[in-house]
Amino acid sequence: MKTMSYSTSRSRIAATVAVAVTAGIGLAACGESSSPQADSPDAGAGDSSSSSGGSLDGKPTPKIYPFPSPDEFVDAIDNPYLPLAPGTRWVYEGTSSEGEERIVVTVSDRTRQVAGVDATVVRDTVTQNGKVIEDTWDWYAQDADGNVWYLGEYTEAYEDGKTSTEGSWEAGKDGAQAGIVMLANPTTGALYHQEYDKGEAEDYAEVLSVDASAKVPFGSFDGMVKTLDVNPFEPNILEHKYYARGIGFVYEKKVQGDDGVLSLVSMSS
């Protein structure tokens, strides 16, 4: 996360995967223009003062949801906006300040026990300018209410012939806490931590809209959840992410600090 970022090694795509296309979503032909289109970055933005996290000195305060007990989790991750069915594979392509990016996300049939929960293992491989720069195994689980939790990751980053696992973390160890990557019932203005390790990882998201639209190489979508994703330790970089029902993460656009984009180009199961 988070895979696909996606934005940082600990919050990349954090949610980028998805499962089969469900009825009611208008998909355009896969041969559409590779130039993604989306609504205005400010369209559908919610009043942050109404967020579930309240405010501090006039600034929104993300909510840290209490982590459920292990017996409150279910086996399958079938949240409509972030379904993670084993065997599903998404391919994303885009650009960043560093060049061309390609990200492949695959839901494995493996689980890993994290904080007493059998978490689904999702692999996320990032290629930049044709070279693998990061290989990550993310751990997700869904509670009985339908919220999808991010429980940590093991990540290997490659640079100058060296391998770093610095971005790795696990809920319940060294003060790290799991966070939510997709709410069971997203509502405009909801503000929540996606992970929390004070002073190390405090990524959070705000739901800006639940009726956004976007067009990417894989198709055209309406009725999407649109979020503002923030890493407090990189305050100059802000990004919007779009999630389609039955598909999951579809599109990402940097709206401050960079002009990078990431779009879904294929999905299979």
Image: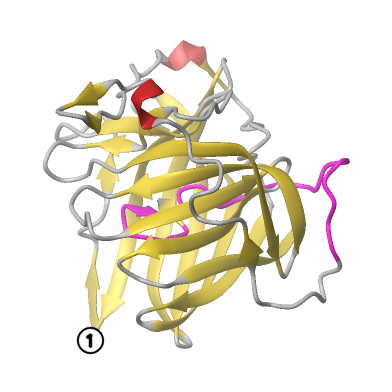
Compared across the picture, whether 226 is left or right of 152 comes to right
Q: Nearer the viewer, residue 47 or 77?
A: 47
Classify residue 160 as left or right of residue 244: left
In the depicted structure, whether residue 109 falls above or below residue 266 = above
User: In the image, is residue 188 above or below residue 239?
Assistant: above
Q: Is residue 33 above or below residue 47?
A: below
Q: Is residue 173 visible?
A: yes
Within the magenta stretch, is there residue 17? yes
Q: Which residues are magenta?
A: 4-28
Q: Residue at x 30, y 29 (%)?
A: 62
Position of 67 relative to 248 (above/below): above
Q: Quadrant of residue 27?
A: bottom right
Q: Looking at the picture, how far across and down is residue 19, in whole percent?
A: 71, 47
Q: What secondary structure is the stretch in magenta mostly built from?
A: loop
Q: Describe the element under mark 1 as helix, strand or loop.
A: loop
Q: Which residue position is annotated with label 1?
A: 160
> Is residue 269 in sight in this rendering?
no
Residue that protrudes farthest toward the left in the picture: 199
Decide whether residue 194 is among the magenta residues.
no
Q: Residue at x 32, y 22 (%)?
A: 53
- Which residue type carries mark 1? Asp
The C terminus sits in image quarter: bottom right
Where residue 106 sits: x, y (%)? 59, 57
